[in-house]
Image (cartoon, helix red, strand yellow):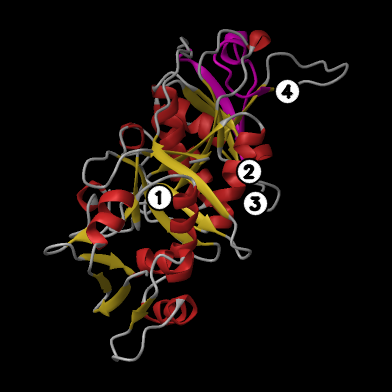
Amino acid sequence: MQPTGHLRGDAVRVGGDARQRFYDARGYGRPLDGDEIALSRVEAAHLLFRGDLSGITLSDGSDPVGFERFFVASAAAADRFAVRFLVYSDLRDRGFYLSPAREPWPGWSDAPGDAVDFVAYERGETPDTGNVKYPIQVVGERGSVATAGLAGRTLAVVDEESDITYFAAEEGRIDGATDYDPPADLTGALLADRVVVWDAPESLYEHGFYGRPLTGRAANVEGALQLSLVEAASLAADGRLSLTASVAGADDGSETDASETPAAAARIVARGRDVEGERFDRRLVVYRRLRAADAVPKTGFKFGADFRTYLDVETVEDLPHSEHLVRVVGPDHEFSPRELSLDVRLAGGVRKEMVFALTAEGNDHPGDGGNAARDADVEWLSVDRLTP
């Protein structure tokens, strides 16, 4: 004869030998006085689903109900109950013991942040003695995921067909070993959305992997190097690039005089804001931080990212594979699960690590892209697929 549970508030109480049967032996619930235990709605539904409870009496005092009625009532009363049940059931089937990540359930203090729904323990370990393996945050396909505080969590996304995809979010870090210092006497022309250095030293591209040579079949021009606006702004902010001319574009047609490096940096940043808005400031912050870490960031456009990174560049002729895709977002950014899945899937498909760079710069512009941009706070968030 299976025991009956009784819904009291938001917990289901089970007496008899429930402590020994469910908590001690199988890690369900939390102990109360004597042999009684309290189960969360999800835990109680799972025991009903398995046939380990004969029924549950609801708070209206009616006869005990089975799985269907309890599931529907709980879905009406509890946030995201259906998707949380699916994830709980899946992880139980994979051999994990879990506890709700809320006080006073076991393991709640090990949950990083209020958004965590469950803590899953190391396989073979119980809630009263086990170490937390996965802090689980559950979200539906059409929900949203805040970037703030996501590091350290396992994200379980339930799609519209009830399939579950798991992602591991960790604090990221990008450290390179590229040893190159650009020359301090570069000059270039600001042309619409790029800067051309007409007489660039060969090492700027070959060893620093800055820009892209202006070349073509039977070209009669040598030494011309096209820089992106973030590359040019960073070089100018470091006092290594001045401007010989600045042309806004065909609609404007105007040309300005040469600019020394401080004015050049401000002019390039202003152009970047004209063509990208505040996104340019955030990308510049991240670009400068990556260069300061001896990594080489290049455009990640073909991968749908802001940058791809090379950690150890000696020569372009012997270029290693890029290791990361970097996407720049604000610290208050909220992912859609579909967006996150696309980014991570693409990075994995090209054997790269997906890293999100979180920076607040952009609302508060970092001046000319100098020290304020280089020293601005950047939080690195690495996200990858996970099979628990």
- Residue at position x 87%, y 19% from top? 217
Q: Which residues are magenta?
A: 183-212
- What amino acid type should be assigned to the residue bearing mark 4? Leu
Q: Percent position (x, y) of residue 224?
A: 68, 19
- What amino acid type should be assigned to the residue bearing mark 1? Gly
Camera-side residue of 97 and 247: 97
In magenta segment, residue 201: yes
Q: In the picture provided, is 240 more to the left or to the right than 108?
A: right
Q: CA distance from mark 1 to mark 2?
A: 20 Å
- Ranked by sequence position, the earlier of labels 1 and 2 is 2
Q: CA distance from mark 2 to mark 4?
A: 24 Å
Q: Which mark is residue 362?
A: 1
Q: Which mark is residue 304?
A: 2
Q: Percent position (x, y) of residue 247?
A: 62, 40
Q: CA distance from mark 4 to mark 3?
A: 24 Å
Q: Residues within 10 Å of mark 1 (few under 14, many from 20)?
A: some
Q: Percent position (x, y) of residue 284?
A: 45, 37
**Mark 4 lies on residue:** 214
